[in-house]
Image (cartoon, rainbow, N blue to C red):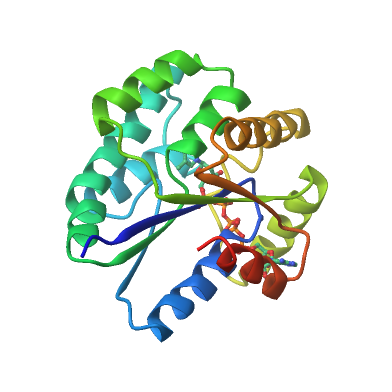
Amino acid sequence: MAGRFITLEGGEGAGKTTQTRLLKNYFEERGFEVVVTREPGGVPEAEKIRNLLVQRDGGNWTPMAECLLFFAARQMHVETLIKPAMAAGKIVICDRFTDSTVAYQGYGHGFDLDVIRQVEVLTLNGFKPDITFLLDLSVKDGIGRSLKHNSGAVGAENTEDRFERLDLSFHERLRDGFLTIAREDPTRVKIIDAMQSPETVFETMVSYL
Ligand code: T5A
C-alpha cells in the first residue's frame, strides 16, 4: 500500500510542531507507521544544509544560491527518506516543504516565483504533498508565540533565529503569500485557523483526512 505525505505550513509560531505531535499519535493509534520529519533537513545531508541556511552565522547567500540550497536539501530528503517511507506504506508528516520556499523566498523576499517553480520542476519533477495544512494566524500573534516559545529554552542559546529576526512587513507578505498558495491550490492546501485551541486546530485538520 502506498503511504501518504502530509505537510504543515505557516509563519513563525503557528503551531506546526504541536500539531505534528497530535497527528502522529492519531495515525499510530490507528495502526499506521508514521515518519515525522522537517525542512530544511530531515536526512543528514539536508541537516548540514539546514545549518548553512538557518544558523545565525550560516552565510550570506544570494537569493538564487539560497533557493538552490533549499531545493538541494529537499531533493535528498524526498529521494532518500520521503519516497522510500511512502513506498513502505508509511504516513510521512513533514514540518514545512516547497510551499515554505515559495512563501519565504518568493513572496517574502521577492525572489522570482517563476524561477522557484522551475527549480521545483527540475529537482522534484512534480512531487507534491497529498495534503497540506496551512496554520494561519496574525503576524502579531505568531511572533508573540514564537518569542515566548524560544525564550523558554533556559540555558540553551537559540541561534536558529535568522528568519524570525526579519521585519513585520516581511511577515505580512509571508502570510499573504501562504494564503495565495492555498487559494491557488484549494484541493491540496487547507487553511486552518491557528488561533483556535490546539485541540480544535487538530480536530479541524482531522476532518480533512
Ligand atoms: N524556511 C524554511 C525558508 O525560508 N524556506 C524554506 O523553504 C523552509 C523549508 C526554520 C526557518 O526556515 C525558514 C522558515 C523558518 O524561519 P522551522 O524550524 O519550521 O523553520 O521554524 P519555525 O517556523 O520558527 O518553527 P517554530 O517551532 O517556531 O514554530 P511552530 O512549530 O509552528 O510552532 P510550535 O508548535 O512550536 O508552537 C509555538 C508556541 O506556540 C504554542 C506552543 O505551545 C509554543 O509555545 N502554541 C499554541 N498556543 C496557543 N494556541 C495554539 N493553538 C497553539 N499551538 C502552539
Position of residue 167 in the picture relative to residue 164 (left or right) = right
Q: Is residue 28 above or below residue 105?
A: below
Nearer the observer, 4 or 62? 4
Residue 142 location in percent, x, y?
74, 51
In the image shown, does 141 or 202 lie closer to the viewer? 202
Is 114 in front, or is 17?
A: 114
Residue at the image position 38 percent from the left and 39 percent from the top: 52
**Residue at the image point whose x is 30% and y is 38% from the top:** 127
- Above or below — where is 140 with respect to 175? below
Which quadrant of the view contains residue 50?
A: top left
Q: Is residue 139 above or below residue 135?
A: above
The quarter of the picture where the N terminus appears is bottom left
> In terms of image quadrants, where is residue 165?
top right
Left or right, 173 with reference to 73: right
- On the image, the x and y values in percent for residue 132 come to 50, 49
| Residue 97 position within the rendered picture, expressed as x and y whole percent measured from the top left | 43, 44
Which image quadrant is residue 31 in? bottom left
**How many numbered dots are placed on residues in this image?**
0
Quadrant of ligand 1: it is bottom right
- From the viewer's perspective, tell me whether residue 183 is left or right of residue 83: right
**Which residue appears at 41% of the width and 26% of the height?**
66
- Viewer can see residue 19: yes
Residue 178: x and y in percent read: 62, 36
Q: Is residue 62 visible?
A: no
